[in-house]
Amino acid sequence: MISKPTNQQLIEAVCAELTGKVAPNISDAGTKVVLEMALSVLSCAAVRTAKELAWMKEETDAIEAVARRFAEEMPEAGALSSALAAYDAGRTGSLYLDAAQADYELVSEVLSCATDAAFASGDTARIGAVEELLQQRMANENAVTGTFLAVGR
């Protein structure tokens, strides 16, 4: 018995029950596919619920540091400066998921503008810095989505 279950533990417990008790009793192929799809979505949600806020914060901090450095080094990067200003004006710093996602959206625009500025500069160190940020984001997305599962095959 889990006395203080996290959302991840609750979702994983539901998946275990569905896999162990419901799935063996389903004979209809279409219903099996529906269950497998639901289990796949729930598995991804379990990972995401446990780590999403931390990942957004980590990415936000890294993006902000690089973007502010770029803005200082490249005052001609007006779109980057504008995106940083919009981020500064709009961010909440809240841990409520909706607000945190809105902050993440703002910093995503900053990342986009920093990427454009880095490539426009042609500077390999700047390009490497934004590629590192993009790799961090992709690693987090891959952890959520996992591997592709051809359900029902």
Image (spheres, rainbow, N blue to C red):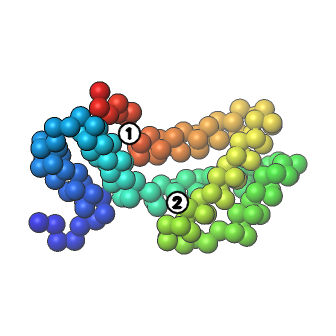
Q: Is residue 61 above or below residue 31?
A: below
N-term-proximal mark, 2 vs 1: 2
Q: Is residue 89 left or right of residue 17?
A: right
Q: Nearer the viewer, residue 10 or 31?
A: 31
Residue at image mark 2: 57
| Residue at left offset 59%, top offset 53% | 62
Residue 65 appears anywhere in the view: no
Q: Is residue 52 left or right of residue 3?
A: right
Three-letter code, disc 1? Gly
Three-letter code, disc 2? Lys
Find the residue positioned furthest to the right: 76
Q: What's the mark number on residue 45?
A: none
| Residue at left offset 85%, top offset 52% | 78
Q: Residue 83's spot in the image, x, y percent?
A: 76, 57
For label 2, count other residues whose C-alpha is less than 10 Å away and answer few (under 14), some (14-19) or many (20+): some
Residue at image mark 1: 146
Q: Quadrant of the C terminus?
A: top left
Secondary structure of the residue carrying tag 1 is loop
